[in-house]
Amino acid sequence: QVQLVESGGGLVQTGMSLRLSCAVSGTIFSYITVMGWYRQAPGKQRELVAAITTGGGTNYADSVKGRFTISRDNAKNTVNLEMNSLKPEDTAVYYCAIRRFARDYWGQGTQVTVSP
């Protein structure tokens, strides 16, 4: 079965960086059409942070453009999110998600907390 496991979250200060990684198993990586990172802050709806397609096309939320970079490593079956210049408003649970054959799969989430 398809499984997604996130890692790399934690507590950092404003301006620091974190790298999130999502390991995907149970599927041939090339069958995945879109991979993305979402986040959900307390009391708010889950929102798309960044996405990357099979062809390498990327899409970012306006709030993270220029600070976050999404990438996929086909050799390691991972999708990564490099987060720089973190702000307190980036505090949320970050979820990895993939779309495979028109079905979405989600990870369990990893907490990112940015202190002022």
Image (spheres, rainbow, N blue to C red):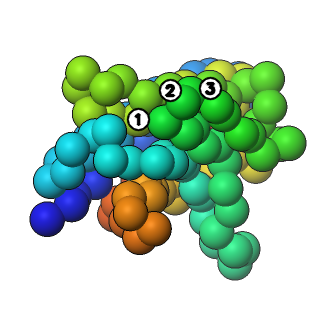
- Helix, strand or loop status at disc 1: strand
Q: Residues within 10 Å of mark 1 (few under 14, many from 20)?
A: many
| Disc 2: which residue | 71
Percent x, y of residue 14? 70, 30
* Residue shown at 64% from the left, 31% from the top: 57
| Residue contact between numbered discs 1 and 2, judged by CB atoms under 8 Å | yes
Q: CA distance from mark 3 to mark 1?
A: 11 Å
From mark 1 to mark 2, how far is it between C-alphas? Answer: 6 Å
Residue 100 is situated, as x and y percent measured from the top left of the image, at: 38, 59
Q: Earlier in the sequence, mark 1 or mark 2?
A: 2
Mark whose residue sits in front, 2 or 3? 2
Location of mark 3 (residue): 69
Disc 1 target residue: 79
Q: Using the image, determine if residue 29 lies above or below residue 109.
A: above
- Image side of residue 50 versus residue 62, left or right: left
Q: Which residue is at the front of the view, 30 or 2?
A: 30
* x 41%, y 70%: residue: 103
Residue 16 seen in this snapshot: yes
Task: Identify residue type, mark 1.
Answer: Val
**Any part of residue 5 in sight:** no
Q: Residue 101, image x and y in percent?
A: 38, 63
Which secondary structure, mark 2? strand
Residue type of the residue flagged with mark 3: Thr
Q: Classify residue 40 as left or right of residue 78.
A: right
Are the residues at dot 2 and dot 3 in contact (C-beta closer than 8 Å)? yes
